[in-house]
Image (tube, rainbow, N blue to C red):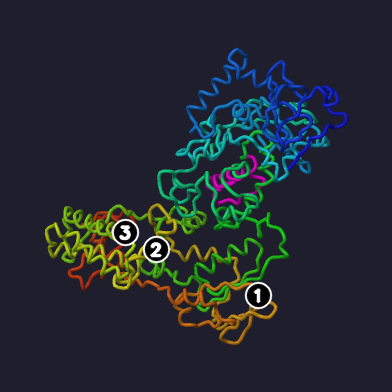
Amino acid sequence: MSITVRKRRGSALSNSPSDKDRKCCDRKCCDTVPPYCFVQASERCAKTGYTSRWYHLSVGQHYCNECFEHFYRKNKPGYPSYARWCARWERESGDIVSTSPKAFFVDLHLPFWVRCGQLGCGKWRKLPANIDLCHVRQDIVKCLNCDLPEEELVALSKDPEWSSTISYTPLLRHSPLTSLLREYFPDGVGISPSVATHSLAKNTGTLTSSGTSGPGPSSISYTPSSPAISLSPDLSMEDILHPFNHPQEGPRARAFTPDVLEEEEIKSVPGLSGSQTPMADLYMIIRNVLLALWYSKCTEYLYPSSCQSSLSLRGLARIWCAEQLPHVLHLLTKLAYLNCGYLPSAPRPFHFISNLDKKSTVLIIGAGTAGIAAAHHLSNFGHRVKILEANSRIGGRVMDDFSMGSCVGLGAMFITGVCNNPFALLSHQMDLHLRGIDEDRCDLISEFGSHVVKEMDIKVEKHFNDTLDHLSEWRSTEDMVDESLETKLGQLHKDILVEQTPYSEEEWRLLDFHYSNLEFACGATLDKISAVHWDHNDTFYQFSGSHALISEGFSAVLTKLSSSLDVELHTVVASVQTLEDGQMCLVDSKGREWVANKVIVTIPLSLLKRGDITFAPPLSDRKLKAISSLGAGLVEKVVLNFPSPFWRCFIGNADFFGHVSSSSQHRGMFGVFYDMSPKHTTPSSTTPSSTTPSSTT
């Protein structure tokens, strides 16, 4: 690609030295004529004239050899400033971007560009070099003369391919990312090491400039912002939402590694082929800033215009990023990483989505969690969606009961891992109360009402974990043949016990408790579980953090989420047909028909196995095989009501306790008891006539 900056008639360039006195940039990708030194620190600065060498940052951004010498040579006036910067940089950085005059000029001397906020203008103007963006209220920046055209460099930097001409690593200053990425070296995640924290704006009065630090017209007025609240997140938010992985921990579900591109991003963004390109650096800066802004206020819709002020990049890279930001915001919204959940004040359809005439009509079978979530997300993008539900209510296996004084989920009840969990986010957005479950404590009570001896508990738990470690080693052997988890654990148990004292009857019962936990997690008895694939779900990133209950119940979430959706109850779909024109036709049990562009089937696996819905043409062999091979676990839940929480005499204010059965035949029978009564109620404050629900599985 070749981008050229031409001399404008009547501009300041007309008084520049003749062409024979100039030296052009030697980069093949850059035909900037003439180059212009943005630093202008040396008295001998070439400006647009001759220099022995032009240093290339990108098309439209260069500095001359005289300014380079002014800071880099120890005997020059600018060297102390460069030395101080180097010391700070080396102290804070991870040596990913090393100290150099190029990095110095990018970090401190490239000018900031701001957009005029005057209605109908929106032109980009260059701030004087000595003004930092954090001292400017960008929402009230206005041109002194909106009739003046933008500099030609602006149009060049809006070209998507302009990023390929960059020869430096763009870094943010005063970024909302700083507090979220403290575990990373700043220069590795697109943040300038010379800025340790997000600085508050300073109130230094109104400044006006009609001058310009470069060729071409540029006149702006700007007002430093008054002190504002820091973007440091509320501590409680980190429990339910954290957009980035921790470098010392495993990957989280629905979280990004800030310096890595995800496969879905590479597939979705043209030209984004790897992480080691200028375009990838700029894309990740935009993405990370957007995620940080969503983290800071996930109850409000993110507009492209409100996000651009956080792109605190120096130079033309800020203009390029501002042009690309709506596309990145659209992608992250489409993938439901932000602008998702319950946002009643958001525009419908989302305002930056175009081509509504190309949107589809969609029929969704089933008004459970999956169907409602799909309908809500698709309607945000302008699709016309209708849900057909066979039952007399929405929710599917979500059904709550309040007859005992507090909410008890007859179906789904627990949020297993609140961090980045959609239900935790929805609860926060809907102002519902999340009750955390303390997973660190699980007292074990025998069938006879006594505590299990702690030393024995530790011994058996260690033995159980050793058995799982041996199971993992066995799975990695070449001659491994799959068998039931019960058979394999029994073999490994005997092998480990060869050199140990034989288990007592009480220890056997305790080991059965751990086995029952495996069965509870898998939803099946050990003899029906594969020894090879029993933990296959660990292949996928898991929701981290503590478990929780929604005090108002899961049904409260689905009721609000579906409030604006078109749901037709008492509609039993009997068949799904593909018509000759590609349209989809649904027929219900009463013979009524619905036609749409697309159909989403969210009915339970058991109904698919039973063939309650016929498909014409039939489903592919691959799908039929998956339906046949998949199993659905079964966990029974019993809710009991007691006059008072007598169990607190044994376990205090713990949320649950484990029950060790009397024999292997009863393994897993009422294995875990959950206290569903209001928290922080001591036994002495509960009257005998009060009712306290307890759930057991």
In what element is the residue under mark 2?
Answer: helix
Q: Vertically, is 370 above or below 215?
A: below
Report the mark closest to the observer, 3 or 2: 3
85 or 381, nearer to the observer: 85
Point out which mark residue 596 bears: 1
User: As shown in the figure, which amino acid type bears the numbered disc 2?
Assistant: His
**Is residue 444 shown left or right of residue 275?**
left
How far apart marks 1 and 2 lie (CA) works out to 36 Å
The 10 Å Cα crowd at callout 2, few under 14, some 14 to 19, many 20 or more, is: few
The residue sitting at 71% across, 38% down in the picture is 29
Question: Residue 99 at what x, y percent from top left?
Answer: 55, 27
Q: Say which quarter of the image contains residue 14.
A: top right
Query: Upstream in the sequence, badge 3 or badge 2?
Result: 3
Query: Upstream in the sequence, badge 1 or badge 3?
Result: 3
Q: Which residue is mark 3?
A: 472
Q: Which residue is mark 2?
A: 536
The residue range painted magenta reads 282-309
How far apart marks 1 and 3 lie (CA) works out to 48 Å
